[in-house]
Amino acid sequence: MLTSQFQDIFAKISPTPEQFVEVSEALKQAYGDNEKNRQALLSKLSGELSKVEKRIERLFDVYLDGDISKEEYKAKRMAYNAEKRSIERRLNSLDGSMNEWYENILTIVELVRNAPLLFEQSSEVHQKRRLIKIAFQNLELSGKELRWKLKRPFDSMLKIKGCPSWCWK
């Protein structure tokens, strides 16, 4: 039956409890390392922003003291403002991106781990369809045999399922 074929496929990509723990720990480690790097970069960029803002203030004082011309002041001010905007964009791009990445990956791994049980226990056809739609592409029925291809990242889960340590190294 078609339903049992889908269940078998979901079982093939589902990590064992040991593999799930290993993957979760690897993700936590990667997130922790990336978060440390993000915090270091955040600190560095904040320092650079502070320097540029101080330069802008000093530049204005130098201009008021008459040590540079209005044209020199405008040119330097434009350059400093461009540098400031660039640093601010980089700072804004760091906000929460790693946290979102970590949560998305962990959600996918949890979905893959629970997919066989979710598919089996779901009495709603639309829920089963939704799981199928999330994981599969190019489904074909040849007689009673289902031909299938998994979407990314589910295809990777199938490839690494057979590895003893889920191929994280």
Image (spheres, rainbow, N blue to C red):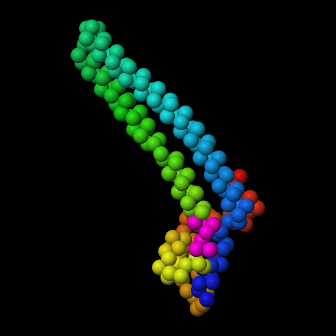
- Measuring from the top left, give residue 169's x and y in whole percent: 71, 52
Q: Does residue 144 sit above or below 93 in this rendering? A: below
Relative to 113, say whether 55 is above or below: above
Q: Residue at x 62, y 82 (%)?
A: 5
**Residue occupying the far right of the picture:** 164
Q: Quadrant of residue 55?
A: top left
Most extreme residue toward the left is: 70
Question: Which image quadrant for residue 153?
Answer: bottom right
Q: Can residue 14 be seen in the rendering of this structure?
A: yes
Q: Residue at x 35, y 25 (%)?
A: 80
Image coords of residue 132 (percent x, y): 53, 75
- Decide if residue 129 is in sight here: no
Q: Residue at x 24, y 18 (%)?
A: 71
Residue 93 located left or right of residue 28: left
Q: Quadrant of residue 146?
A: bottom right
Point out residue 167 in the picture as x, y percentages from the top left corner: 71, 58
Does 18 appear in magenta?
no
Could you say which is closer to the camera, residue 13 or residue 77?
Answer: 13
Marks counted in the figure total 0
Q: What is the magenta range? A: 111-118
Q: State the predominant SS element of the stretch in magenta.
A: helix
The answer to whether residue 113 is magenta is yes
The residue that appears at 55% across and 60% down in the rendered structure is 107
Q: Quadrant of the N terminus?
A: bottom right
Image location of residue 121, percent across then percent down = 59, 78
Q: Nearer the viewer, residue 73 or 164?
A: 164
